[in-house]
Image (cartoon, rainbow, N blue to C red):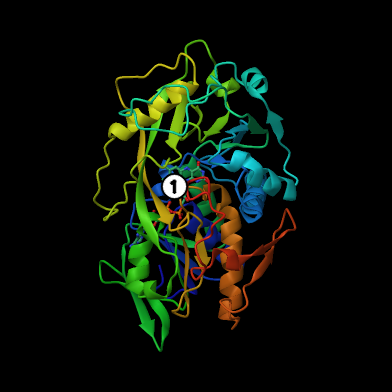
Amino acid sequence: MSNKYDAIVIGAGIIGACVGFELAKRGKRVLNVDKLAASGMGSTSGSCAIIRLHYSTPDGVAMAREGYYYWLDWSKYLGAVDPTGMVKYINTGCLVFKTEKNNYLNNVKSSLDALHVVYEELDTDGIKKLIPIVNTQQYGPPTLPSDLRFGQPTGGAIAGALYIPESGLISDPKQSVHNVQVAGENIGGEYLFKAEVVEILKKDGRCAGVKLSNGTEIETPIVVNVAGPHSYRINEMAGVIDDMNIKTRPLKQEVCHVPAPEGFDYNTLGTIISDSDIGCYSRPEVGNNILIGSEDPDCDTLEYVEDPDNYNTNFTQQWNTQVMRVAQRIKDMRIPNQTSGVVDLYDASDDWIPIYDKSKLPGYYMAVGTSGNQYKNAPVVGVLMAELIEACENGHDHDKDPIKLTMHYTKRECNIGFFSRLREINPDSSFSVIG
Ligand SMILES: Cc1cc2nc3c(=O)[nH]c(=O)nc-3n(C[C@H](O)[C@H](O)[C@H](O)COP(=O)(O)OP(=O)(O)OC[C@H]3O[C@@H](n4cnc5c(N)ncnc54)[C@H](O)[C@@H]3O)c2cc1C
């Protein structure tokens, strides 16, 4: 390892690896530094790795659409084969229930239409035909199990759903980062593990390098903060937070794994389900299991974490709440006595939309606040950040005149200013993991 690079990326999760890869493609000597022992061991390893296209804004759909094509074309994008195995995109389709909370998907439909994403509108018969084990009774708005209303119908059937056939998941999120690492290393990118950044070095009013916990200093004119749930800490070190209108915080999440109803092959016949009527999303999980995550309904108390290195990593009552919620929807779903699944952290932004931006410190950039929904977009974020960094380093004032990127597959223009740290809170956001 040298002690001088063109760029240092703090973090070797899926987004950090894709940023490093794109910078290496543009001829930069780039080093990804991570305090953990290998790539993908941060929050990416806990990701549900769902690749879905429905977002509530056309910009959200556009990014997801673009990202989807990268995952379909994974080997072509990487231009390399990882000898330890390449991940696969598994198409499952996605069923999204219409509720008052999501404005009966009217914004989502117009956003999908804008990007020519195919979907079907299903009534309750259509939903049952697609997945016969789904109960179409309305129970929402979601409540806590301690509420007497929990589990009681709140009207007739749910208002219908959208089915988006082009949606699925990635077989192994941690391995997907290794795939990108191999591709990056093939073209000169470097990785340093077990190396914790403790200081952002500055010289002549700009960023000049990083200092590691063992005292090593590495010089570079460009530092990119892609530290996931630790992002706010790195921003604090850089002294750039007072300039940011949107901030980031680590938020605890519990993901449950439960057996699918006996006799139903969920891995083959199940789909991703986004169900704001009960406040959960779910997807098929290996071993004929159902994976359940929370859509963080209003009745739940969000568990923001002060210290991402020291928080309660056990399952809590929240695990039971999520499982009981989905048991309302899936007929004959058994509730196991043993908890199983994943506990991890989102890097949540104030409006659940990420920050892909420069900062007030020249040479210091950030791809943070990914709010539980940016795994799918990682390859696009790599390109977007490389473009942003190149333009800013060439003197462009991105804050005054936001850079626009013509996306590779969709040919749509992405205004990178949409992700600015200086934006006002976006009122069109779902203010949840849905983005
Ligand atoms: C439970 C869960 C489910 C999710 N499900 C989905 C989903 O289905 N679909 C979707 O699109 N997105 C999903 N997401 C979001 C997605 O996984 C994340 O947005 C993405 O993985 C973030 O990648 P990253 O590279 O930014 O961060 P990370 O993977 O967290 O990587 C950050 C890295 O920075 C390192 N680091 C931190 N501080 C330092 C330091 N001081 N020095 C050196 N290294 C440091 C960490 O060790 C870590 O490896 C989910 C997230 C979670 C937690």
Picture quadrant of residue 259 = top left
Residue 180, position as x, y percentages in the image: 54, 52
The image shows residue 256, relative to residue 107, as above or below, that is above
**Lateral position of residue 366 relative to residue 163, left or right:** left
Q: Residue placed farthest to the bottom in the image?
A: 204
Q: Determine which residue is flagged by label 1.
A: 44
- Give percent across and percent down for residue 60: 61, 53
Total number of numbered discs in the rendering:
1
* Of residues 8 and 341, the one drawn nearer to the viewer in this rendering: 341
Q: Is residue 202 above or below residue 61?
A: below
Is ligand 1 less than 8 Å from the beta carbon at label 1?
yes
Q: Where is residue 141 shown, x and y percent of the image? A: 46, 34
Give the secondary structure at mark 1. Answer: helix
Left/right placement of residue 72 relative to residue 314 reads right
In this view of the protein, can residue 433 be seen by the observer?
A: yes
Residue at 61 percent of width and 38 percent of height: 104
Residue depicted at 38% across the width and 61% down the height: 231
Examine the rendered structure and indicate whether residue 199 appears above or below residue 17: below
Amino acid residing under circle 1: Thr
Viewer can see residue 340: no
Give the position of the N terminus as an image quadrant.
bottom left
88 and 355: which one is in front? 355
Looking at the picture, does residue 359 appear above or below residue 104? below
Q: Residue at x 54, y 53 (%)?
A: 429
Quarter of image, res 91: top right
Q: Nearer the viewer, residue 101 or 236?
A: 101
Q: Nearer the viewer, residue 396 or 84?
A: 396
Q: Looking at this rendering, what residue extends furthest in the top direction?
A: 263
